[in-house]
Image (cartoon, helix red, strand yellow):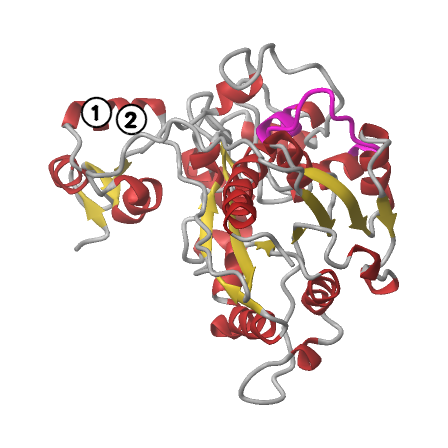
Amino acid sequence: MNEYMTLSETSEYIGKSKETLRRWDKEGKLSAVREPISNYRVYRKTDVDTLFADFLDEEIQETISNYVEPQNEYTVLELFAGAGGLAVGMEKAGLKCVALNEIDKWACQTLRKNRPNWNVLEGDIKSHSFTDYENKVDIVTGGFPCQAFSYAGKKLGLADARGTLFYEFARVVKEVNPPICIGENVRGLLSHENGKTLQGMISILDEIGYNVVPVQVLKAINFNVPQKRERLILVGIRKDINLKYEYPKPYREIYNLKDALRKGDLFDCDVPKSDGSKYPKSKIDVLDLVPPKGYWRDLPIDIQKEFMGGSYYLGGGKTGIARRIGWDEPCLTLTCSPAQKQTERCHPEETRPFTVREYARIQTFPDEWKFEGSVAQQYKQIGNAVPVNLGKEIGYSIIKFLNCYYNSSKPK
């Protein structure tokens, strides 16, 4: 099939009327583009597949809620906890956080400020032992950074991963021996080192006694997050447990920037005022010319060339550059620095980056969750986080699994 699809082809492909597609185009849920040669309005097949892959099967019903009530008190030990996006989400789902490890001192201060009762283990994970939690914790979670391994043999073992942070994640899982462990990472892990890094991780978890569920990339927009963020989820089930883990089911409802920053279904008030970065005057002069939902290609040609420099002549869409987000679309993935060169996420109406509280809303943090450190430190903490609502949905899927586990066989 071609890279582009006409309105009729797209309508037939996903089983939706042309009127529905036109409405989705207006709402920013599935945007049409101008085909380069004919200038007709068409859809990129990749856009159609990415956004609606989960819904192409006509038998898939609307997901009302993934909510599951815990039948026991289930406990979580979180590694690489950051500012608490995943931990808050798990808490909202009904899981109890018994300890969190994080090396960044500002993120640790954020965790302590918001949850004085949480046991925050500050410092390098290598310096902490977790043997006190052996057979006492239900879930170990962690967003370990993606690092290359040294491949000593055909099958990568735990020893070969020494010195990487995945080694530390696996070490803690081995020490604690939980029924289930959850790692999360960027989508890029799928292709890192031609997929060998991910395979190495799977073989290490196998070595320490865990079967890995087929890996999935979860799209935050499908889980009540107004942001096009993707997270790769790695789920390990202890080998003595013969139960299937099911990923949270996606929702059809997709929330936009307006839902994040204005009173509505996601939040019961407009976004609170807060500090934020500013663009230099040279960037303001350029971004003033970009319409909502536009980017550098919407600038006059001479300004395009000046702003993009040598990048102007390179391939690729670079659609995140000089990008002004529209009210009626989900935000692009937030970065750790909102004003950094060539990953602009400009406010729809004002020529400025999103403020700290706007950033937090787009990541679905509650307004009462306060971030410590300088404004730059706060942006970094929020930009690195797992969206809270995505964490909550993953939490529900874990509770569903643990309910089945504890009902089917009492652990020894």
- Residue 221 highlighted magenta (yes or no): no
217 left or right of 88? left
Q: Quadrant of the C terminus?
A: bottom right
Q: CA distance from mark 2 to mark 1?
A: 6 Å
Tell whether label 1 touches label 2 (CB within 8 Å): yes
Q: Which residues are magenta?
A: 358-375
Q: Residue 141 location, x and y as percent?
A: 66, 51
Query: Measured along the vertical axis of the image, is residue 285 above or below residue 43?
Result: above
The answer to whether residue 353 shows anywhere in this view is: no
Q: Does the magenta stretch mainly form a helix, a strand or a loop?
A: loop
Q: Amino acid at mark 2?
A: Trp
Front residue of 246 and 339: 246
Label 2 SS: helix
Res. 24 mark: 2
Q: Quadrant of residue 107?
A: top right
User: Is residue 368 highlighted in magenta?
Assistant: yes
For image coordinates 49% across by 15% down, the residue present is 265
Q: Image quadrant for the N terminus?
A: bottom left
Q: Nearer the viewer, residue 143 or 132?
A: 132
Q: Position of residue 57 (x, y in %)?
A: 22, 43
Query: Which residue is located at x 70 percent, y 43 percent?
Result: 75
Tell me if mark 2 has few (under 14), some (14-19) or many (20+) residues whose alpha carbon lies within 10 angstroms of its own. some
Q: Mark number for residue 20?
A: 1
Give me the residue at 70% from left, 81% from top. Answer: 159
Which one is in front, 343 or 171? 171
